[in-house]
Amino acid sequence: MSTFTVHDAKARLSELIAMAERGDEVIVARGSVPAVRLVPVLPTETAERRPGTAAGLFVVPADFDDPLPEGILAAFR
C-alpha cells in the first residue's frame, strides 16, 4: 500500500494511475488522513441480449390503456 498527499497525487497522477492499474493499492490522503483509494475500472462483460428471454415474467393489466382519473390528469396540466 502506498499513500500520497493530495499535493503529491496532483504532481504524479499518471504514475499513480499506472500503479493502480497494476494492482497496487494507492491511497490519497489529506495531510495524514486517508481520503480516497485509487482503483482500476474493470471491463464489464456484456452478455448477448436475446429478445423474449423475459417472456411471461410480466403481464400487462387489462386496464393499462384506460383513461387516467381526473385528479391525475390535472397534475399533468
Image (cartoon, grey):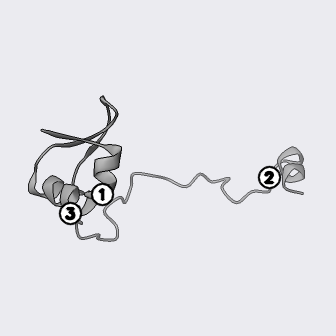
Q: Nearer the viewer, mark 1 or mark 2?
A: 1
Q: Residues within 10 Å of mark 2 (few under 14, many from 20)?
A: few
Instruction: Please tell me which residue lies in front, 26 or 41.
Output: 26
Chain-order first, disc 3 or disc 1: 1
Task: Give whichever of 39, 51 is nearer the camera.
Answer: 39
Kindly identify which residue carries mark 1: 11
Mark 1: which amino acid?
A: Ala
Outermost residue to the top: 33
Q: Secondary structure at mark 3?
A: loop
Q: What residue sits 90% from the left and 51% below the top?
A: 74
Within the image, what quadrant is residue 41 found in?
bottom left
Q: Which mark is residue 45?
A: 3
Q: Is residue 69 above or below residue 77?
A: above
Residue 47 is drawn in which quadrant? bottom left
User: Mark 2 — residue?
Assistant: 68
Determine the residue positioned at 14% across, 55% down.
19
Q: Residue at x 19, y 60 (%)?
A: 15
40 to the left or right of 23: right
Which numbered dot is residue 19? none
